[in-house]
Image: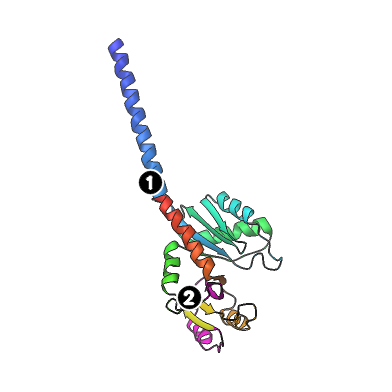
Amino acid sequence: MQGWASERVARQRLVGRETNIRKRMDSRYSEAAMNVMICLLRGVNLAGHKKVPMEVLRNLCTSLKHCDVQTYVQSGNVVFRTKESAPLVVARKLEKAIEQEFGFRSDVIVRTPSDLRDVIAKNPFAKRGGIEPSKLVVTFLPKEPEREAQDVVRKIKANPEEIYLTGRELYVYYPDGMGRSKVSAVIDKALQKGGTARNWNTVTKLLEMAEKLEGNKR
């Protein structure tokens, strides 16, 4: 009897160790399967309209099962890790949550860290000296504009501003500042207000935050 009992205890310990190993492996697999997403809200916290406190935004994202949620400044920028793999699904779920919480709709545009690295690599002003990051603005579009809209944008006579459209991003340099420019309204009309703009400082900071989360998941 004693030998049998000892054998049973040994088997239980072995099963327990195997169970713990599987749990650790499952946990590591789950961590590795997480994706990092950058969400850009359109038109929030502007002149007191469509107010979205960043703490509430973080809580909304957490309620959607996203992890390590972080926000940056008040213009509606949020970075997190998620099991979702489709940016469009992430965008639609967050849009719905925002509408339910605040009673208004805010379009959400989602990019991956790889997308932002590509945006930075394609910066048409990268090799030019004297460019002020706060005056270089990237408008992130939900999709690449139709050819007709692209033609309209490229024909805009912008001076002293400079405009470059590539894929889903529009780069505009405002040497005198964005606030005094009249070209922004012309661009919005051509693109039917389909995007949301961030200055270069914000773009690079969001990538920095996203890459830190990428490092955490490895």
Secondary structure, mark 2, is loop
Quadrant in which the N terminus appears: top left
Alpha carbon separation for disc pair 1 and 2: 34 Å
Q: Residue 124's x, y, as percent?
A: 44, 78
Above or below, 7 against 95 in this view is above
Question: Residue type at mark 2?
Answer: Glu
Three-letter amino acid code of the residue under disc 1? Tyr
Q: Residue at the top extreme?
A: 1
Q: Is residue 45 left or right of residue 66?
A: right
Residue 172: percent from the left, percent from the top? 53, 79
Determine which quarter of the picture holds residue 120: bottom left
Which residue is identified by label 1?
Answer: 29
> Which residue occupies 53% across, 86% down?
152
Out of 65 and 129, give the one closest to the viewer: 129
Name the residue nearer the viewer: 40 or 134.
134
Q: Position of residue 125 (x, y in %)?
A: 46, 78
Tell me which residue sits at (49%, 78%) in the image.
Answer: 130
User: Is residue 142 highlighted in magenta?
Assistant: yes
Above or below: residue 57 compared with residue 158: above
Q: Is residue 104 magenta?
A: no
Can you name the residue that lies furthest to the front here?
130
N-terminal of the two: label 1 or label 2?
A: 1
> Which residues are drawn in magenta?
132-161
Disc 1 crowd, CA 10 A, few/some/many (<14, 14-19, 20+): few
Residue 85 seen by the camera: no
Q: Which mark is residue 144?
A: 2
Indicate the position of residue 23 as horizontal and vertical percent values: 39, 37
User: Which image quadrant is residue 105 in?
Assistant: bottom right
Q: Dot 2, crowdedness within 10 Å: few (<14), some or many (≥20)?
A: some
**Along the viewing direction, whichever of 176 and 209 lies nearer the viewer:** 176
